[in-house]
Amino acid sequence: MAKFELTMPKMGESIIEATILSWTKGIGDEIEAEETVLEIATDKVDSEVPSPVEGKLLEKRFNEGDVVPVGEVIAIIETESAGADSAPTNGVPAEVEVAAAEVPYVPAGQPAVATAERVATGEPRFYSPLVLNIAKEESIGMAELETVPGTGRGGRVTKKDILSYVKTRGSQPAAPVAPAAKTKAPAKPAAPKPAAPITYNHSGNIEIVEMDRMRKIIAQNMVQSKHTSAHVTSFVEADVTNVFQWRKKNKDEFQKKYGEKLTFTPIFLQAVAKALVEHPGINVSIDGDNILYKKDINVGIAVALPNDNLIVPVIRNADRLNLAGLAAAVNDLAARARINKLKPAELDGGTYTLSNVGTFGNVMGTPIIMQPQVAILAVGAIRKIPAVIETPSGDMIGIRQKMFLSHSYDHRVVDGALGGRFVKRVADILEAWDLNADV
């Protein structure tokens, strides 16, 4: 007999912990290889953790509701294999592969030290994006955050630590922090505790339903984006008659040739990817006073779920895919998103986002930027409208297929000239679509 250590899987570069939603196996249950052992949730997506080995569940290290760091042992599985206790990763599917080394919760090459010691020696303390978001929502400044006791590895502050601190904040004295040996400027005072939330007196026939976890995350992310970016939106109307007619003429042949349904979304995606190559100033993010130019073009596509929530899987290197590849990627990600089968890594690393609001019959919209991106495009419904058509023999009125493109961008780094040129270029690419192009 041998014991296999099942660890919290690696789920993307920005995800360092996950919450255990439920155990699908109990102590003593037999487990087949690739069978789900537990369900977990991150701030991006819910996921299942399968067992790489066949055996019997011997031990659970954590309970439902616990927040567990990536790489932490969460269960022990007894296997029939002989040999020393180990947690091999060879042969484990990519979605559950765990890095062999410990997750670096402190900068590489720096020892983990306690809070007071870290401040005294000038060592930086690592905070996960989730902890920083909670601190921001609760108006906890960095000076105050440094006083929060951490129970994670190396004194790291976990989600449970920050939430526990928020509950008792104000009723207990702050933890002592040794004075810093070297400081460039006086420490800023902690932000004041926010006022109590406004309560409303509701009347009439109502039903009160608490937001589900995903809706709470969406709400937090949208508010954070509006607080972070200076949103401005430019609108362009595009004549997509050629696109409409070409798709209508070729969609059946396309599906027969590639085995994929051809919607308008991959066509729009192709135009967006081409425009991003030509406008690298849109494919960026902001880090303090620095602009980070992204060399990869990873476009997120907004997908509406059956419960009316929204999720944004990412198509990586969209500029390197042809129309068939884009259609396959869009169809696959959208289908798995609607049945909650996306991998956390498939929601990470987006550099730009496309939202097809025309799917719901909307003419246009003013989308909110997905942080840390700086722009997002909403494409509206395609409509038949009368339009002026210029011909060599003079102008005439005709029926054309037209749509609006709504481009929201962060005015901190993208001015109107660049934001406007980009969306106009997307429209130009669509209007120049070759009606006689081969499938």
Image: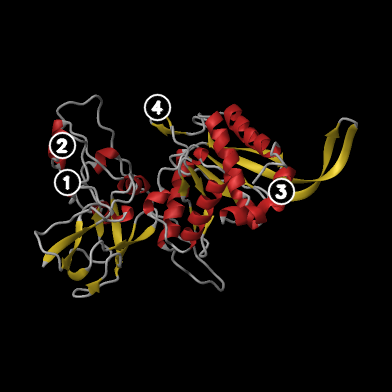
Which of marks 2 and 3 precedes in the sequence? 2
**Secondary element at tag 1:** helix
The outermost residue toward the right is 393
Reading the image, the residue beneath label 4 is: 289
Q: Where the N terminus falls, by quadrant?
A: bottom left
Query: Residue 86, how many percent across, how many down?
Result: 13, 57
Percent x, y of residue 334:
51, 56
How much space separates mark 4 and mark 2, taking CA atoms?
Answer: 26 Å
Q: Secondary structure at mark 3?
A: helix
Q: Earlier in the sequence, mark 4 or mark 2?
A: 2
Mark 1 sits on what residue? Answer: 155
> Amino acid type of disc 4?
Asp
Q: Residue furthest top?
A: 184
| Residue 243 in picture, x, y percent from top left | 69, 45
Q: Residues within 10 Å of mark 2 (few under 14, many from 20)?
A: some
* Amino acid at the residue labelled 1: Gly
Q: Secondary structure at mark 4?
A: loop
Any mark on residue 291, and which? none
First in sequence, mark 1 or 3: give its number.
1
Kind of residue sitting beneath label 2: Arg
Quarter assignment of residue 54: bottom left
Q: Is there CB contact under 8 Å for labels 1 and 4?
A: no
Q: What residue is shown with label 3?
A: 244
Report the residue at 19% width, 45% height from top. Answer: 101
Report, in whole angstroms, how far the alpha carbon at label 1 lies from the one at label 4: 29 Å
Q: Is residue 173 above or below residue 55?
A: above
Q: Residue at x 56, y 56 (%)?
A: 259
Residue drawn 67% across the image and 34% down it = 428
The amino acid on which the numbered mark 3 sits, given as a three-letter code, is Phe
Residue underneath mark 2:
118
